[in-house]
Image: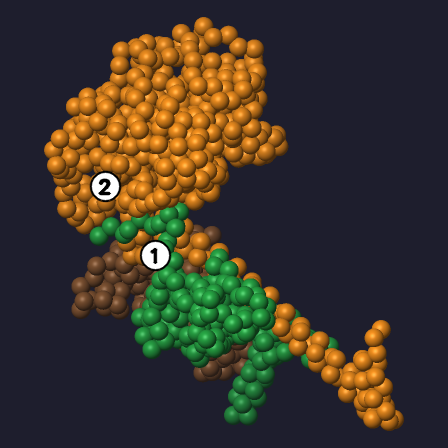
Amino acid sequence: MTGTFITIAVMIMSMAAVGYVLSRLAEPARRTDDEDPDADIMSANLPDMQLIEEVNRRLPQTQCAQCGHPGCRPYATAIINDEAPINQCPPGGDALIEELAALLGTDVMPLDNDKGQTKSAQVAVIVEPDCIGCALCIAACPVDAIVGAPRYMHTVIADQCTGCELCLPPCPVDCIELHTINTPLQRWQWPKPA
Amino acid sequence: MRELALILLGTVLVNNFVLVQFLGLCPFMGVSRRVDSAIGMGVATTFVLTLATSLSYLVNRWLLVPFELTYLRTLSFIVVIAVVVQFTEIVIRKQSPLLHRVLGLYLPLITTNCAVLGVALLSIQQQHSLLEAMLYGFGAAIGFTLVLVLFSVLRERLELADVPAPFKGSAIALMSAGIMSLAFMGFSGLGS
Amino acid sequence: MNRRKPVKALLARSRRLQQTGRSEPDGGLPLVRNKPGLEAVGVPITELPVPEQLVYPLLDYARQTVQAQVHVGESVLLGDSIAEGILATASGTIKAIEHRPIIHPSHRDALCVVLDVDATGDENTQSLATSDTLSTERLAQACISGLGGAGFGTALKLRAAQNKVANISDNSSETGIHTLLVNAVECEPLISCDEALIRSDAQTVITAVHTMIKLSVCQRCVLAIEDDKVDAIAMLSTAIDAVKSDTGVDVELVKLSAVYPSGAEKVLVQRITGKPLPTGVRATELGILCLNVATVVAAWRAQAGYPMISRIVTVAGSRANKPCNIRVRIGTSVADVLQSTGNAPEADDSRVRAGGPLSGFDLQSLSVPVTATTNCIAIEPPQSKSAAMACIRCSHCSEVCPVNLVPQQLYWYASGNDIQQAQRFGLDNCIECGCCDIVCPSSIELTSMFRYARSSWREQQQDKQDADIARERYEQRQRRLSHREQEARKIREEKKTQLISSKDPIADALARARARKRPS
């Protein structure tokens, strides 16, 4: 009886040892916090970082926070950490959901209507007669698409504007409007046949 | 030489472990949604099966039989398989985090894949030598991968097909698997 | 068993093909010759009278808007520049710059320059100086663009070909063009403008080709034509023997079996060189300059000082009363063309199409202007299309595909919105020729689905680029803000240490205040 137990114990321990050796070979030694002062929680987990980057690359980068996260990268992090489903992004729409489903091997689900609707392409336009030059919208724009300085006229660079609407709430005189862009001719698409 | 070729032929086609012997159906149904994850799973299982069968043979021959502990066969084989699977999982996580995420739970579930334990035990039953055991495990895994990839291609097409509502999803997949199984049973008698 | 014979036969065939450099097409359809509107050989091409108004869309070949270089009310002369790549094709006054309907499958309007014609001028109005040799600058000045259908700027194409490293096959790196391929194939039914040009004056064509040989400094020149254009071939052979040139390069007349769509650049290059073009690689990158025969003639005329102000247009179709090939001033409306040639559509349900039966599309308005890429106007009866049925997987479509695709699978994935998978099956290579549509027994609209899938993919790629730019700007901004915060933190830390280390903080503070006030 003791022989059995000893054998089992020896076997388990030797297998564990083999497993430990093999895993050490597979995993390179990580730098500890003492050696690398810039290391933080985010940089320690390299495979997850790669995944987050992959998901982030597919998000529309409007940084609009409609998904409930303060930007596209936090949303990507939440998806990888299984804290958020893939259907929270209105600017991405159904095409994004299909792409993320294909990437991560999950199911396609309909867009979460509580987060908003997918809108057609739009740009913000500042109504210049009403602008007071307070620079609050400049601070709000996540892609620096508004040009101006305190007490000088502000204007939106239309090419850089993603239509995220983050500049509308800070404006104290509500002088920013959203205009729908007409698709230029070179971006016209053939319709899908029935 | 002829015996080795026959072992390979037998495990890949004639006695295919998934479609003829109906082992390992869980990853077969679970991972076959897309071709790339199917190929990844197939490669992982090949690695695990070959290594696990060989190690199991060694454990049996040098530990269990001399010390008359053959009643510990199942337990010890499971331990061997678990270690190999854990190693495989770590390697995959480093090499391709995306594949690791897509395979998800099915990667550690290779441990409980009845095909892996089944191949190890059947190999002992058929009194293979080390080389034969290795080839047996390898052939079984190749057969598994072949069928998994074929099925995943089928399922990708089924995804877009106009399937009647009662049959959508797993139902049509299982029916297709059954028809594939019929086809593979046509290999019986090959090589004799 | 004589199993070796097929292999031997295949090897012999491939050796033969490598020697001649001509391969049979992999797919394609040998369509019956249907070229109405051709005059007798040697008859010059009728010139259409210039209308009172000419309209020029402010678009380049990629449909991007170009800036007008004139303003309303300005007087322009024939040959003056109206915008980048667009010339005034008659003298007159700019009436307006406004949105007008244009020839485009979307049936949308675009910003156009409208010219009221005062003096029509003619083909021999010389607006540029004659030069001894042709140069790329002259091509750009004369606004020569491709007359084959795509309308790429010829100067750009030439420059790209000259700058690219050529000859991937033998791993040697030579710069420049080694083969000039003149495309006189014109494979699509109904369209016969290039053939008409050759039949009217083959000597001019060959002279023009020699000029282009000189400009491109090539080692080989191939003039490709379909073998059923018998009269044109005879005229060209005579002209090649007659016209002497000092370039040392002879014009090789290659007669290809008439298979649609051999006139497409990708397919033509494969037939001439025997090797298919790799995905995404243009012929210019392989050192082959492929130009339409009408473009070459226009380039030669540019050397003589005549800008490109007109093009030959075929008017044909089963409801055309008088199919013909006429020289049309660029900017003339389709309505004027049809009226002047006696082909105004009589029945209410006649369709007027721009382009050929396979590559063209219906027009909704007849007041659209002819551009440099309008090769054909067709008047057809209403379409009688049978309803599409389910795909029976017969694979006729992949047998006839000239670029070796599997339309069956492409359609499957495109209709299921899995365009990424369709891309993996080679959707990028599709030339939208329509061969698969013709042979499909279930009458499935394959080409329309591929057009949709390709334009959808282009749109997705463009969106991705925009998103990447937005992401970079955002990350740049984040870095800037965090950098600023770090700097501020550092200054605060320094101040704190200063305060702590100073013996008499009040005196120090007073000293600092005094230092700030003092003008330095």
Task: Work out which residue is located at the far front of the displayed protein and give it.
Answer: C73
Within 10 Å of disc 1 (Cα), the crowding (few <14, some 14-19, many 20+) is some
Chain B shade = brown
Q: Position of residue A43 (x, y in %)?
A: 61, 74
Find the residue positioned furthest to the right.
Answer: C503
What residue is rendered at 60% in x and 79% in y? A41
Judging from the image, what is the letter of the chain drawn in green? A
Residue at point 73% right, 83% down?
A: C492
Q: Is residue C13 visible?
A: no
User: Please, is residue A14 above or below residue B100 in the view?
Assistant: below
- Image quarter (top left, top right, bottom left or bottom right) of the N terminus of chain C: top left
Q: Of the residues under marks 1 and 2, which one precedes in the sequence?
A: 2
Q: Amino acid at mark 1?
A: Asp
Q: Chain of mark 1?
A: C
Q: Relative to C504, is C413 on the left or the right?
A: left
Q: Which residue is mark 2?
A: C364
* Drawing shade for chain C: orange
Do the residues at discs 1 and 2 belong to one chain?
Answer: yes
Q: Position of residue C184 (x, y in %)?
A: 38, 22
